[in-house]
Image: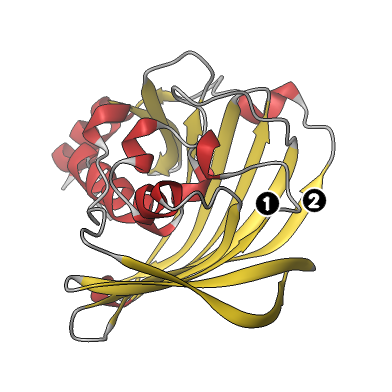
């Protein structure tokens, strides 16, 4: 399978609104959680089903993505390192370990913040991944979202970078003083069809080895792509 920079940028742009609570490093306030979070995500438009391991420590973030989209399996890693303005995407091409680097600003969310919204708290207790949550509905003419938020994890909406806070459901939550960690989001278009969904299934605090954020041994991805094309 040919893998190009455009493919990765497109996927990250698609993935951002699905796993946007995983992108905390760039321009964010200090966050105290260290450990590993697992989440599942779906995107019906591209028939995506994925599982993501998000490892975070000291402002460094690693997302390990496994799943399928449009019937094609994918498996790669995204690194966002403290004080770096680029995303590093690690994968394999023809058995060779390679890395693509793209500025963080190029990976823009595809879902805009809802305008003229009504946010409502839904009565009743909810538990997700062992944490107590409040359920909110977010509605506007453009679509709606159902969001389950907890205040029992030491991450919250204010920890997210401006890119996400201004371009996703997080902007709406923040505007309504909802700052907990969204454990589940189901987003629907104006026609009621699901655009994407995401649910955190596991939160495991604990120490993280520095080696988790290493990209040693990875070559230039663009060169590997050119070699792959020449072979074909």
Residue farthest right in this picture: 206
Q: Position of residue 70 (x, y in %)?
A: 28, 73
Mark 2 or 1 closer to N-term? 1
Q: Is residue 57 left or right of residue 193?
A: right
Tell me which corner region of the image, top left, top right, bottom left or bottom right, holds residue 115.
bottom left
Residue farthest top in this picture: 83
Q: Position of residue 78 (x, y in %)?
A: 47, 38
Q: Would you call the spot at circle 2 few (<14 residues within 10 Å), some (14-19), or many (20 or more)?
A: few
Along the line of sight, which residue is nearer the eye, 108 or 154? 154
Residue 42 visible at all: no
Q: Position of residue 111 (x, y in %)?
A: 25, 57
Q: What residue is pinned by disc 1?
A: 37
Q: What residue is pinned by disc 2?
A: 204
Along the line of sight, which residue is nearer the eye, 42 or 115? 115
Tell me which corner region of the image, top left, top right, bottom left or bottom right, holds residue 141.
bottom left
Residue at 52% from the left image edge and 37% from the top image edge: 158
Q: Disc 2 on helix, strand or loop?
A: strand
Q: Is residue 141 left or right of residue 95?
A: left
Residue 150 sits above or below residue 224 on the image = below
Way the structure is coloured: secondary structure
Residue at 36% from the left image edge and 47% from the top image edge: 171
Residue at 54% from the left image edge and 21% from the top image edge: 217
Give the Cα separation between the discs numbered 2 and 1: 6 Å
Q: Are the residues tagged 2 and 1 within 8 Å (C-beta)?
A: yes
Q: Is residue 85 left or right of residue 189?
A: right
Q: Which quarter of the rendering shows the N terminus?
A: bottom left
Q: In the rendered structure, find residue 114 and report the number of the disc placed on it.
A: none
Q: Is residue 186 left or right of residue 202?
A: left
Q: Disc 1 on helix, strand or loop?
A: strand
Along the line of sight, which residue is nearer the eye, 232 or 139? 139
């Amino acid at each position: 399978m040919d893998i190009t920079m455009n493919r990765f940028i497109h996927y990250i742009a698609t993935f951002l609104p699905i796993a946007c609570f995983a992108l905390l490093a760039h321009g964010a306030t200090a966050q105290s959680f260290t450990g590993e979070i697992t989440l599942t995500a779906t995107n019906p438009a591209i028939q995506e089903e994925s599982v993501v391991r998000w490892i975070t420590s000291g402002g460094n973030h690693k997302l390990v993505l496994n799943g399928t989209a449009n019937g094609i399996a994918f498996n790669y890693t995204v690194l966002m390192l403290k004080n770096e303005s680029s995303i590093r995407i690690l994968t394999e091409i023809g058995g060779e370990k390679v890395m693509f680097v793209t500025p963080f600003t190029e990976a823009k969310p595809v879902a805009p913040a809802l305008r003229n919204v009504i946010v409502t708290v839904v009565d009743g207790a909810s538990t997700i991944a062992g944490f107590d949550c409040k359920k909110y509905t977010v509605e506007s003419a453009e679509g709606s979202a159902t969001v389950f938020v907890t205040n029992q994890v030491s991450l919250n909406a204010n920890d997210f970078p401006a890119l996400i806070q201004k371009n996703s459901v997080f902007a709406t939550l923040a505007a309504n003083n909802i700052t907990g960690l969204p454990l589940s989001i189901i987003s629907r278009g104006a026609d009621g069809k699901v655009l994407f969904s995401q649910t955190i299934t596991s939160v495991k605090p604990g120490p993280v080895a520095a080696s988790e954020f290493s990209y040693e041994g990875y070559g230039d991805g663009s060169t590997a792509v050119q070699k792959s094309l020449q072979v074909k």
